[in-house]
Amino acid sequence: MGFLSAADWQEYKDCINEFNLDDSHKQVMTWKRLATNLNRWGEDDNVVHADVQLNCLVQYNYFKSWPTNQTTVSGEIDKESLLIWLNIKYLGDAGYLTANGQFNFRPGEDRFIIKGEVYKALGDSQAAQASDEPLEIFIVLKKEETETGDLVYE
């Protein structure tokens, strides 16, 4: 016999969603969502990303149990990782979920910009489980190497 009734679980879900949307998930990031595919010859000379502003909760210094910097001849590259937490209801209301309730993004092609730094996704998972559905998703992000020239992200 469980300790929580269906009404208790609904109250829990309402509290989590209200806290996420009204209080905690306030960091604005830019999701550079791939808006085009390869052309018919399999070339990517005309890649276009759509900028989508999303609210999230950022968990900094996620992987710090081993060195994340890589030493090169020209200096050190910071390979810092972080997590972003996204509310599933928020993503669903914005139309960014698949039919299965998964965040509809392309991990290998989409990028995320947080405080001017460009990150790519390493993995994602649903989290904050209620009795019948997950309430949040988190994405592990790794800092991309700085691009120069015409492709500098600002």
Image (cartoon, rainbow, N blue to C red):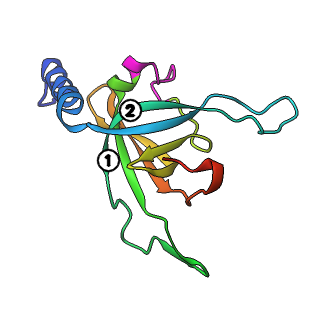
- Along the line of sight, which residue is nearer the eye, 101 or 122? 122
- Along the line of sight, which residue is nearer the eye, 140 or 114? 114
Residue annotated with mark 1: 58
Judging from the image, what secondary structure is the residue with disc 2 in? strand
Is 121 situated left or right of 58 in this image? Answer: right
Residue 112 belongs to magenta span: no
Residue most toward the right? 41
Give the image location of residue 50, x and y in percent. Answer: 56, 30
Label 1 sits on what residue type? Val
Is 141 situated left or right of 107 in this image? Answer: left
Picture residue at 49% right of the left edge, 57% below the top: 143
Give the image location of residue 110, x and y in percent. Answer: 57, 40
Badge 1: residue crowd in 10 Å (few <14, some 14–19, many ≥20):
many
Residue most toward the bottom? 73
Picture residue at 14% right of the left edge, 18% below the top: 7
Q: Main secondary structure of the magenta part?
A: loop
Rendered position, 91 above or below 105: above
* Picture mark count: 2
From which residue to which does the magenta span run? 92-103
Judging from the image, what secondary structure is the residue with disc 1 in? strand
Residue 93 belongs to magenta span: yes
Give the image location of residue 100, x and y in percent. Answer: 49, 23
> Which quarter of the rendered picture does the N terminus lie within?
top left
Badge 2: residue crowd in 10 Å (few <14, some 14–19, many ≥20):
some
Residue annotated with mark 2: 54
Rendered position, 114 above or below 18: below
Is 94 situated left or right of 42 in this image? Answer: left
Picture residue at 49% right of the left edge, 51% below the top: 119
Give the image location of residue 149, x and y in percent. Answer: 64, 54
Measured Cα–Cα span from mark 2 to mark 1: 12 Å
Label 2 sits on what residue type? Leu
